[in-house]
Amino acid sequence: MKIRVRHRKLGPLVFLSQLDLLNTMLQALRRAGIPFALSEGFNPKPRISYGLPLPVGAGSLAEYFDLILKEVVAPGQLKEKLQAQLPEFLRVEKLWEIADREPAIQARVCAADYYIWMPVLDAGAQEHIEDFLVQKQWNFLDRRGREKDLKKLVWEIEFLKIKQGLAGFKITAAAGSRENLRPGDFCELIKKSAKGSIGSPGRILRCELYYRGSGGLLTPFSGG
């Protein structure tokens, strides 16, 4: 039996690394007595696979993982048992059975939705942001010294204006193994373009992951 789980990662748990998150989830699965399958070989491991890794410090409303079970268990019962063993800020939103042939989430993800908020330091921030958004290119030098145009990775962006001292953005951007917008790179670039009127670090919340379907974008829930 193969199941897919969607859960939240919020509060202080945003500082868990992807490895720490995986270990936390595995500990909860063991305590809940969920009969997950192991891989074969000399070093068997739980057959669990997460979707697109989340940057440390970012929150999420839509973390997904797939899990192979050794026996059939009702999804409702699984959700109840697992949630009882998870800390407060890891909340299971949905849990459902998927086909054994369904590809891994990470292999199919092509885009993600983010909300990003950055602290505003002076009144000139809005003008700098508006000037930045209409630029034809957003050239950025990554950690390996490679120049990228981040604007090519952003599919849609909405400036949510400045409220309570924060500049907000809603972004749908390329995500996955082929093309991927790092939200932190966007924060660095817009901070630099704002000429000191915006501070860091930005607050990042991932809201959804998407597949490319014949009729448009599908979530791992609708597409799985």
Image (cartoon, rainbow, N blue to C red):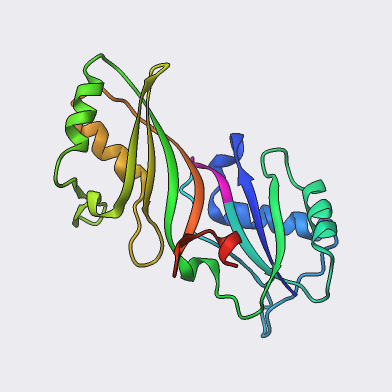
Determine the residue located farthest toward the top in the rendered image. 123
Q: In the rendered view, tell whether residue 79 sits above or below residue 164.
A: below
Q: 195 above or below 73?
A: above
In-front residue for pair 148/170: 170
Report whether residue 180 is seen: yes
Name the quadrant of the N terminus.
bottom right
**In this picture, which residue range is highlighted in magenta?**
57-62
- Quadrant of residue 96 within the rendered picture: bottom right
Whole-percent x, y for residue 87 in the image: 73, 42
Quadrant occupied by the C terminus: bottom right
Residue at the extreme bottom of the image, as rendered: 41
Between 197 and 160, which is closer to the camera in this rendering? 160
**Residue 163, how many percent across, how many down?**
40, 19
Q: Residue at x 20, y 23 (%)?
A: 127
Q: Which residue corresponds to the image point at 34% horizontal and 37% vertical from the top-left?
A: 158
**What residue is shown at x 66% (from left), y 76% (from top)?**
99
Total number of numbered discs in the rendering: 0
Q: Quadrant of residue 153?
A: bottom left
